[in-house]
Image: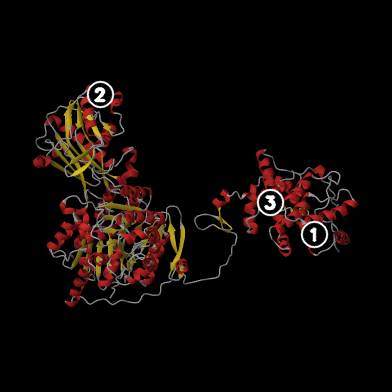
Amino acid sequence: MAQRGIREYDGKKMLSKYWSEYFSKDFKFPGKVVLVDPETKINELTKKFNWLNKEKLVVKPDQLFGKRGKHGLIKANASFEEVNKWIKERINKETKVGKVTGKLTHFLIEPYIPHKEEYYIAIKSNRSGDIIYFSNHGGVDIESVWDTVAEIQIDIGQDINEIKIENKLPKDTPNDKKKMFVNFIKGLYKFYIDLNYAYLEINPFVISGNEIVPLDLVARIDDTGHFESSGKWGDLSFPAPFGRKLTPEENYIKMMDEKSGASLKLTVLNSKGRVWTMVAGGGGSVIYTDTIVDLGYRDELANYGEYSGNPTTDQTYEYAKTILDLMTREKDPKGRPKYLLIGGGIANFTDVAKTFTGITMALRDYKKKLKETNVKIFVRRGGPNYQEGLRIMKNLGKELGVPIDVYGPETHMTRIVDMALGGK
Amino acid sequence: MVKTKSKKQKNEYIIMDKETTAIVFGYQQRAIQRMLDFDYICRRETPSVAIIVNPTREGAHKCFWGTKEILIPMVKTLKEATKMYPEADFMVNFASFRSAYPTSKEALLTKSIRSVAIIAEGVPERRTKELIKIAKEKNKWIIGPATVGGIAAGGFRIGNTAGMLDNIVTSKLHRQGSVAYVSKSGGLSNELNNIIARNTDGVYEGVAIGGDRYPGSTFMDHITRYEKNPDIKMIVLLGEVGGMDEYDVVDAVKKGKIKKPIVAWCIGTCSKVFPAEVQFGHAGARAGAALETADAKNEALKKVGVAVPKHFDDFDKEIKTTFDKLVKSGKHKPIPNVEPPIIPIDYDVALKQGIIRKPAQFISTISDDRGEELRYCGIKISKIFEDEYGLGGVIGLLWFKKKLPKWAAGFLERVVLLTADHGPAVSGAHNSIVAARAGKDIISSLVSGLLTIGPRFGGAVQGSADHFTKYLYSEDEPTFMVKDMKSKNINIQGIGHRIKSVTNPDVRVTLMIEYAKKNFPKTETLDYALKVEKLTTAKKNNLILNVDGVIGVLSCDMLRGIGYTRDEVREFVDLGILNALFVLGRSIGFMGHIMDQKRLKSRLYRHPWDDINYMMPDKPEVIK
């Protein structure tokens, strides 16, 4: 439901696939790109892509992070054998990129193109339309030569053919290339729109004979455009950002979330933290987490979590069990209590009592462990049938012998944070 | 204090109020009812929903106006709707993410429509931007996409905004207060209503602009309206991490364009503790650049003099302090609360809460289709398959509400098999065939056959059960029964066969008797009937207990065997249970014949003349 990054490989593949539809026949992009993932049988690649054996190659990871050259993650002007070896040394290995550590799993292999001139083009979207950026001085550090970049604003609904692109090119654009660039810019813009791109940066692209070759491409796509553009997208995947390694519990919740129409989210921030949240609603869950941090309990915060969109009793049961399991695995080393905040704003139509059913089932299952790890529970919720929901929770506290403090809409939404942690 | 302005004088800063009427696009029955219920507790004079556009159906939609029922017209196109209700200047668009764009565009291009609320989530960003452009050119308003909408307290509610009625009253939304808010999140708007109601004189208006990257209208668009509206004394802003829209507000305050007090908070201050970029629920909420963080926005807002609490936990206090200051300064006199009219509770809600009851019109004691699984007499359908209830077992559950022992279920199945067909010549089958050949459908043809079942055709099963139990249960001897029937000149049903006789027994009868003798706990009616048979066959060789008779009497014995008293058996006989068994079985045969004829493409049947003896008189008898 948002803009999502795509692999460089997919961006380039799409460009080459629809090249003839958007660009002049006078120049082309052959789209020689190969993606290697842990399943790929690298040794067999040459059968399908015989250019791999014939040309010098470039290889780099393709996992939504940039500045690969700076991180020593590009091997250029190499034979296929060298590329193969280079990948094998890195694939599935933990690698630190900047501050983030993750596994390298996807690599992009392309022909190595010797070149002198590097060009820059990017398209960004804003509220009133799109801006095309173009420069004859592409390369890694475009910011340092930003005064060579021409900006062309195209308003929403405006036909790019009505804009005299040639007049907007940077002054230092070689005359013999103007026609080609104008065609390339127009085509790329139409491609960008038709395929619901939200961001596209090619830095640099080079010219080799009658070929335009994007060397480095970064793109985001508006995934809500699926119903309009998925035909052209083909089998497009939206990989998770590099380095986000999910714990088994996070993965379990993620899988439940993907299978269901409801929303179930869990991020474990600090499994040793004493404050766990289980909050209904996307906005509500953020506010609770904010408040814990802003009141100075950042180091105690264990997780971010949210359930919404009318999950079934089974789903809330599984969700609650996952959190309860995590939080009751070990006692606080200093013997202090742990806190579970079952929070939420005022629901519009969700039957509060009903959504508590799965949670109460899970709390019953964990009765013993909750007591052993000295868990105190605070509840705050409003909305349809909340009185009944709160009553159920209150009685459950008595039944289990676990302290459960219960509040409704008369209590400010986040006050239970301070009640629990500030002892107020 | 509520200034009612006529249509023409309406100020441009008001987009929804007590006089606004809307076109609802999409047949969202509950949302429509919620809008009308809100109207009712606001004491609106006319419903806020003028007409419904439903691309697949036209006519009228029945809904409640208070306790009364009213009809709201429903048409297939927006064009018709605006033609009928040119004064309806608001469209609540429930179209899906696929059709939200074309329908909203059409609305924005329609002269009489001034505002469109787009509820759908997942509208492509580029499409929203196109809509924004049109709205700007035509000087129109978009709320959304991806929002619950908004509410003008005491006046107009967009769709489902503000939830249930009791919450609306608790949050004093049934009358105008003096605080207007704008938030991104629709989910939190109810919490805002609550916070504002508890700490000020209440909400004047609230809008949730929606969580998309490019909302159709921005914080600043609405705050600009709020600034111009003299009835609004104070503004509440709930922003969010991601995007730069809050900075427009910072700028406007800095430049003195907004002078009314603002209390603001941007949620997502916790983003700094997340390791990689975690995507929150909203498309626009993605903390990238430093300026887009909630902390930076809160800081910037505070710097220009907006009231920003230290954390959300003090948001309520900040709102209260700011409002109290306004009152103390004498700039504002708090608007008192008013009692809303009594809200009729929906029947199903009240029932669920256990506060009303009513005698049911219907009672059903054999099955229940509600809940997870269909149940016959308490037994889940999956269990029926698991335990192999079979046809007999299911008849037991639905007719007798008993889990039948194997012998009884087996008996019923044998009856069905035995009665399934008796050839094409018998009355019922004949009728079915004739009807089928006349081109009638399977049900008409079947019924045509079934209608012949009665005292003469197929009725012997029923008749024999009736005759034999009547005499047996009155403790009359078989000899008396034979004599008594003779004297009344009634043939004993179930006795006699055209061909079969004592010496040439009907194998069907023999099999049934054998089964019963082996499996039934007792066979009193059969034994009685056999005694009668002895007497009748003594007179004439073919007056044997026939297949109808044996089914009739054994059915009675089966009922006795599964625990019914003689009185109860008579009750079953009287209500026609034997005919029911016969109909059940024979329908199989009738349908077979009907399908047979249809497959054969048999043509219309006409009885041959030579088979009819025409004996018409030359002239009618004249009555003098």
- Residue A191 visible to the viewer: yes
Q: Where is residue B455 in the image (x, y as percent from the top left)?
A: 77, 56
Q: What element carries label 3?
A: helix
Camera-side mark, 2 or 3: 3
Q: Distance between the residues labelled 1 and 2?
A: 97 Å
Residue type of the residue flagged with mark 2: Trp
Residue, far top: A54
- Judging depth in this view, the residue of A124 and B139 nearest the camera is A124
Q: Distance between the residues labelled 3 and 1?
A: 25 Å
Q: Mark 3 points at which residue?
A: B407
Q: Mark 1 points at which residue?
A: B467
- Judging depth in this view, the residue of A145 and A259 nearest the camera is A259
Figure check: B177 above or below B565? below
Q: Is mark 2 on a helix, strand or loop?
A: helix
Q: How far apart are marks 2 and 3 (CA)?
A: 79 Å
Camera-side mark, 3 or 1: 3
Q: Name the residue under label 2.
A: A51
Q: Where is residue B304 in the image (x, y as percent from the top left)?
A: 12, 63
Q: For mark 2, name the chain.
A: A
Q: Residue B524 falls in which quadrant of the image?
A: bottom right
- Residue visible at 20% across and 74% down in the picture: B324
- Residue B242 visible to the viewer: no
Residue type of the residue flagged with mark 1: His
Mark 2 in CB contact with mark 3 (< 8 angstroms): no
Residues marked 1 and 2, same chain: no
Residue, far right: B539
Q: For mark 1, name the chain.
A: B
Q: Residues within 10 Å of mark 3 (few under 14, many from 20)?
A: some
